[in-house]
Image (cartoon, rainbow, N blue to C red):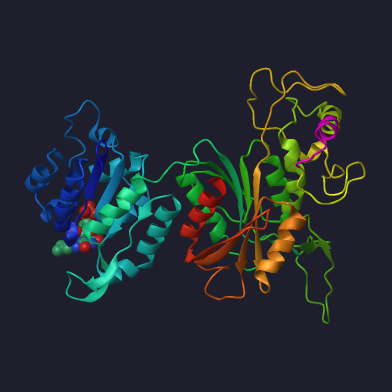
Amino acid sequence: MLKNKTVLIGITGGIAAYKICNLIRLYKKEGANVRVVVTPNALNFVTKLTLQTLSGNEVYVDNFEIKEYKPEHIALTEADIFVIAPASANTIGKIANGICDNLLLSTACAFSKPILIAPAMNENMWKNPFVQENLVKLKNAGYHIIEPETGFLACGTNGIGRMKEPEEIFEKSVEILSEKQTLKGKKILITAGGTREKIDPVRYITNSSSGKMGLALADRAFDMGAEVTLISTFKAEKPYKNIVAQTALEMEKAVKENLAGQDCVIMAAAVSDYRVENVSEQKMKKQGGEVTLRLVENPDILQEICKLSPLCHSVTFPPQGGQRSQALNERIEHEADREQLSSARSSTPSPTLPAGEGVRANLTPETLTPPPNPLPQGAGECAKPGEIPTNPIYFSPPLIIGFCAESENLIENAKTKIRKKGCDYLIANDISRKDIGFNTDENEVYIIDKNLNIKHIKKDTKLNIAKRILEEVFE
Ligand SMILES: Cc1cc2nc3c(=O)[nH]c(=O)nc-3n(C[C@H](O)[C@H](O)[C@H](O)COP(=O)(O)O)c2cc1C
């Protein structure tokens, strides 16, 4: 099963180190090449000779004992996965903070393939807020953590902190190694979080969305090989592109600026329907009595990009903004006429097209933004009015996925919404339930496509739900 795979095992100074002998055997049985790196402290718990004999390879401890053609921490990175088990609180903290004061840590810092960490420690150490903070940091940076379980601990107590059994660590690593890169070559834009609509410099209107679902989608899409752009209302320390947009208007701008060239757009953010009309520049003071805030409607970003996307595949962009407006206008007019926008997703009637066949009224050159520089050679020349440019840049219209959170009549409301918005899929979740949806780690959703077919995905972690959604829409 693991022929042609190299598994690098990292062992730290914890009592569970003796269990790794079994883990090595599991990998060897499946034909993997196993290499082992240990911290100096780990050798208090397990001998180099045992590990060497079981792995059939040299065991590495010291940074400066260079036997290979490259420094060892670089040579060791040439593995398919790095499994650190047991991972001590000490080593977890150091990896999370970029500390490299032994060979195992330097290797972890330089390792670019998946890293699986199996923590093992005393219950109080596990519950220590700094240890937890470090684990969150690692999870957010894309490390795989196989959480310890509750049971009898070597310190003589019963509690959480016992390393998962070697069989489970083995299975988890095999799952990671066989994770299909089904989204390789795809560009996916995802929005996440509840927007914040300012009232004054210190107050704002927001909603209960935590952004966890959008983040899970972005993480999963990245794991599956996609080039991800996450537009979120919060800063996310991630190995993919992250743009922070806090208000609905900022989010609209960021989405439109990054729309060209995307294969898929997933609008998981909870965008406020309204914003305050006149945001106070100064902090509002109590004046006694009532205050009235006048709210105005925010743009419906999902609906707008559904109208724009049919044009994405045929628009050419001049390299500079200068003369763009007129040329691009002409191009949009030309393409809209030529194609009749038969694939247009909006059902809003247009002055020139039959009802349901798309809208041109809201399209302006300003709403379409050029792809990032550098442009392909020769591309981006302006079309003269009525002419088809010689070197246009062609984009396929992105697949558009919206989310809807409903507190009643979930499916009926979702069906109405997908027709109104015109997206390819709508993911509906029930926010009246306390155990799923807003601000929880789990969700249960219905995937509705534009033909109103419905697929139910049962309650699961948001990461697993995200994987199912991506598999479903990209199958
Ligand atoms: C008998 C014994 C058992 C230990 N078990 C653990 C453990 O399970 N988890 C842990 O985080 N630290 C444990 N420690 C403490 C670590 O060995 C210590 O923090 C050390 O600095 C870890 O170094 P390393 O991360 O470089 O291997 C144990 C220490 C002793 C003496």
**Percent x, y of residue 92:** 32, 55
Residue 99 appears in the picture as rendered: yes
- Relative to 52, is 297 above or below? below
Please, which residue is most extreme toward the bottom here? 289
Total number of numbered discs in the rendering: 0
Left or right of 99? Residue 67 is left
Which residue sits at x=25%, y=36%? 76
Task: Identify the residue shown where x is 65% and y is 25%.
Answer: 375
Magenta span includes 339: yes
Front residue of 449/184: it is 449
Specify the quadrant of the image occupied by residue 111: top left
Residue at far right of view: 351
368 or 77, nearer to the observer = 368
Q: Main secondary structure of the magenta part?
A: helix
Above or below, 226 against 144 in this view is above
Give, as a single range, the part of the protein colored magenta.
Answer: 334-343
| Lateral position of residue 159 relative to residue 454, left or right | left
Percent of width and height locating residue 21: 14, 52
* Residue at left offset 45%, top offset 53%: 140
Up-down relation of residue 126 to residue 340 (above or below): below
Quarter holding the N terminus is top left
Quarter of the image for residue 13 reads: bottom left
Is residue 110 within the magenta segment? no
Ligand 1: quadrant of the figure: bottom left
Look at 85% across and 30% down and name the residue there: 334
Where is residue 208 shown, x and y percent of the image?
62, 68
Q: In the picture provided, is 393 more to the left or to the right than 236?
A: right
